[in-house]
Amino acid sequence: METVGLAAKTSSSQLSHYRFQRRELRPYDVAFEVLYCGLTVADTQAMTNEHFTTHFPLVPGSHMVGRVVEIGADVTCFAVGDHVAVGAVVDSCLACEACYAADEHLCVEGATEASNGTDRVTGEITRGGLSRYNVVREDFVFPLPDGMEIETAAPLLGAGVAAFAPLREHTKKGARVAVFGFGGIGHLVTKLALLFDVEVSVFSRTPEKEQDAVSLGAAAFHHFDLREAESLEHAHNSFDLVVDTIPVKHDPTRLLSLLDVGGTYYLSGHPDSLQEIDLAPVASGRRRIVQSTAGGSRLTKQVLAACAVNRLAPTCEVICAGDLPAYIDKLRHSQARYCVVVDMTTLER
């Protein structure tokens, strides 16, 4: 299937039109027209090869919503015309213990990522959702719940999963949660906290975001600077969970000191964003360090269901494909409010 997308040809180039072939449908494949695609800080980092893992040309976009246009011979869960959603993981072995538990992102053979991954059959590099059409195995395609806003659903497959996971796995009713960074993931931690009956305090480098944080349900807002130790001293031993969404390289040691005994530090991002960690605060207080950048089908279904039932949606800027250069710059400088979604029907064919 021929399609057109937007690709970075090198680490220093802008996105430009790129024609390429999607694979022919396998028996369990679903082909869909991409209607909306989320763009994240991780996409901008891949475009510049920040983590030295990018294969060019790169078609970014790991969270997308679309309409089914064709199905493989053995597909039973979808029909042409269905609205569907796809997240960061598009294939796995489906045979290991993690895959059986629907935690495919932890597949022992390695999960295939939607963008810049490796196809398990052909070995070709996967191309992401900034394209008109995509083809994905049905196990990693999710029906869009009735009533969910199609324009703003895509970030739930990325930032939504990243925000939902630490709250579900590391809190109980009444827990005290600190979220560092109030962007795509951080603002969804604040929104989702209401579903878990926990108290969220927001720590942000941008004081202008205080009004938004409080209006979304934050119990407190703190302006902080990691370079200034005194900006966090007042909060030592105050939280059961610290969710770190800071996208730039930083020392998390001061964040660990905010945890109460038995608390959890949860890095919701790439481990390369951390400098060397001083483990003394961890060992001295039975604290835990957890890191995750994605979720499996079990968690993804839970996020979509919970958000549909509670009519909860991310705060998004929905943009035309032609506006991407400006918004890539906004993402890099933490100026987007708060998730960026590209209307792929505006991409010229």
Image: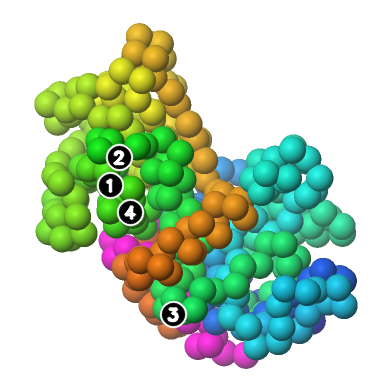
Q: Are marks 1 and 4 in contact (CB under 8 Å)?
A: yes
Q: What amino acid is found at the position of numbered circle 3 in the picture?
A: Gly
Q: Are marks 3 and 4 in contact (CB under 8 Å)?
A: no
Whether residue 278 can be seen here: no
For residue 328, side relative to residue 57 (left or right):
left
Q: What amino acid is found at the position of numbered circle 4 in the picture?
A: Leu
Point out the stretch of residues depicted in magenta: 332-349
Residue 32, given in percent of the width and then of the height, sits at 67, 80
Residue 60, given in percent of the width and then of the height, sits at 58, 64
Quarter of the figure with residue 314: bottom left
Residue closest to the eye, 187 or 176:
176
Look at the image and say whether residue 337 sits in the magenta stretch: yes
Q: Which residue is mark 2?
A: 173
Q: CA distance from mark 2 to mark 4?
A: 10 Å
Q: CA distance from mark 1 to mark 4?
A: 6 Å
Q: How many marks?
A: 4
Q: CA distance from mark 3 to mark 2?
A: 28 Å
Q: What amino acid is found at the position of numbered circle 2 in the picture?
A: Lys
Tag on residue 152? none
Q: Which residue is mark 1?
A: 197
Q: What amino acid is found at the position of numbered circle 1 in the picture?
A: Asp
> SS for tag 1?
loop
Residue closest to the eye, 11 or 287:
287
Q: Which residue is at a point 49% across and 64% down the rendered structure image?
A: 304
Q: CA distance from mark 3 to mark 4?
A: 19 Å
For residue 214, side relative to residue 304 (left or right):
left
Q: Which residue is mark 4?
A: 195
Q: Which residue is mark 3?
A: 147
For residue 46, side relative to residue 170 (left or right):
right
Q: Quadrant of the N terminus?
A: bottom right
Quarter of the figure with residue 74: bottom right
- Against 76, residue 255 (above or below) is above
